[in-house]
Amino acid sequence: MAKSKANPNFKVVADNRRARYDYAIEDDIECGIVLLGSEVKSLREGKANIAESYATIDNGELWLVNSYLPAYQQAKTFPHEERRRRKLLVSRRDLAKLWQKIGREGMTLVPLKLYFNEKGRAKLKLGVAKGKKNVDKRETEKKRDWQRQKARLMRDRG
């Protein structure tokens, strides 16, 4: 029997689907995240939320603000704070590029996806984004609806 190519360590924990609707993502970057032991256990259970969070650069360091990692039930003696600031790990060169990009007007750092990579390490995908106006959001919905209709037509005729 052939082995499956899917890596058992790769697992998406939290996905910020709303970010692609509210923001125009120009660029993205993968970065590590500093976690406590109970936070990693909580992530392994898949109970995280990054929908309301954002990233900021403070004193030359990259931070994830307002992300929610629920308390791990078996870690009762040393629990972690659920909404604390978490440090993100990027190289100095990448940090300088991010600082330069968000220095432009209207640009922000939005977390897109929180996952465990192939090596089993927690990673966060950040997007350099610009907020969309309501007109842009409607245009995105029109394009998405047209793609669905086109797929239906092709499926019915083909």
Image: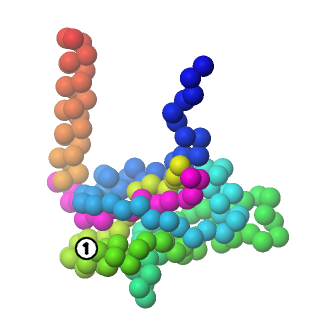
Query: Taking 108 as reference, is 14 above or below it?
Result: above
Query: Foreground residue, 134 or 148?
Result: 148
Q: Residue at x 32, y 79 (%)?
A: 96
| 118 sits left or right of 131 in the view | right
Looking at the image, the residue that sits furthest to the right is: 77
Q: Judging from the image, what secondary structure is the residue with disc 1 in?
A: helix
User: Could one spot residue 156 in this view of the protein?
Assistant: yes
| Image mark count | 1
Query: Foreground residue, 84 or 88?
Result: 88
| 100 sits left or right of 58 in the view | left
| 24 sits left or right of 73 in the view | left
- Which x, y percent locates residue 54? 42, 68
Region in magenta: 119-135
Q: Is 138 colored magenta in this rendering?
A: no
Query: Taking 73 as reference, is 142 above or below it?
Result: above
Quadrant of residue 48 within the rendered picture? bottom right
- Which x, y percent locates residue 50? 49, 60
The residue identified by callout 1 is: 101
Q: Residue at x 29, y 74 (%)?
A: 97
| 53 sits left or right of 41 in the view | left
Q: Residue at x 53, y 67 (%)?
A: 33
Query: Foreground residue, 40 or 143?
Result: 40
Q: Residue at x 47, y 60 (%)?
A: 124
Quadrant of residue 73 within the rendered picture? bottom right
Looking at the image, the residue that sits furthest to the front is: 2
